[in-house]
Image: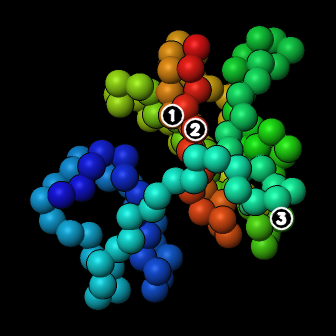
Amino acid sequence: MTEKFQLYKCEVCGNLVEVLIPGEGELVCCGQPMNLLTAHTEEEIKGEAHLPYMYHNEEGKEILQIGEKIHPMIPEHYIQFIQTISEDGKTAVIKFLEPGEEPKMGVKEGLGNYIARENCNIHGLWSTVIKH
Ligand SMILES: [Fe+2]
């Protein structure tokens, strides 16, 4: 049984999928079960930051940056996407990123408390809760 917003990865081909509507079945890719990704919730890598960091810009808009010390965005090592999920699970917003772009995302107004998560192409999934 899957759960809404779980992320599963195929270790063979790299497919990464998000569950939108859960079902009973097991997710399979390239002939084998896909791996459920578990998010890191604390900084664990010396000299690097991965957790989404929230601040307000000059206009007062809420911005998420990866991380407090900004994460590299080079082709070999970059943030693939940032996602916010509202506390009630009704609103999910995802921003896809390319190397060379800033690892930042404007947060939808009025979102309240939410989960902020991101995926690094090398270091995987990182998640934090932003409370207001
Ligand atoms: Fe990284």
On the question of residue 73 being in view, the answer is no
> Where 78 falls versus 11 (above or below)?
above
Name the kind of residue labelled 3 in the image: Ile
Residue 74's disc is 3
Name the kind of residue labelled 2 in the image: Thr
- Out of 77 and 94, give the one closest to the viewer: 77
Whether pointer 2 and pointer 3 mark residues with C-beta atoms closer than 8 Å, the reply is no
Whether pointer 1 and pointer 2 mark residues with C-beta atoms closer than 8 Å, the reply is yes
Tag 3: Cα neighbours inside 10 Å, few (<14), some, or many (≥20)?
few
On screen, residue 73 versus residue 62, left or right, reads: right
Mark 1 or mark 3: whose residue is earlier in sequence: 3
Mark 2 or mark 3: whose residue is earlier in sequence: 3
On screen, residue 80 versus residue 75, left or right, reads: left
The residue carrying mark 2 is: 128
Q: Quadrant of ligand 1?
A: bottom right
- Out of 106 and 5, give the one closest to the viewer: 5
The mark lying in front, picked from 1 and 3, is 1
Q: Looking at the image, which residue is at 35% across and 74% down?
A: 34
Q: Position of residue 50 (x, y in %)?
A: 71, 50
The residue carrying mark 1 is: 115
Query: Element at badge 2?
Result: strand
The quarter of the picture where residue 128 lies is top right
How far apart are labels 1 and 3 at the CA level? 26 Å
On screen, residue 107 versus residue 33, left or right, reads: right
Give the number of callouts: 3
Q: Looking at the image, which residue is at 18% across and 58% down?
A: 1
How far apart are labels 2 and 3 at the CA level? 24 Å
> Where 71 falls versus 108 (above or below)?
below
Query: Element at badge 1?
Result: strand
Name the kind of residue labelled 1 in the image: Ile
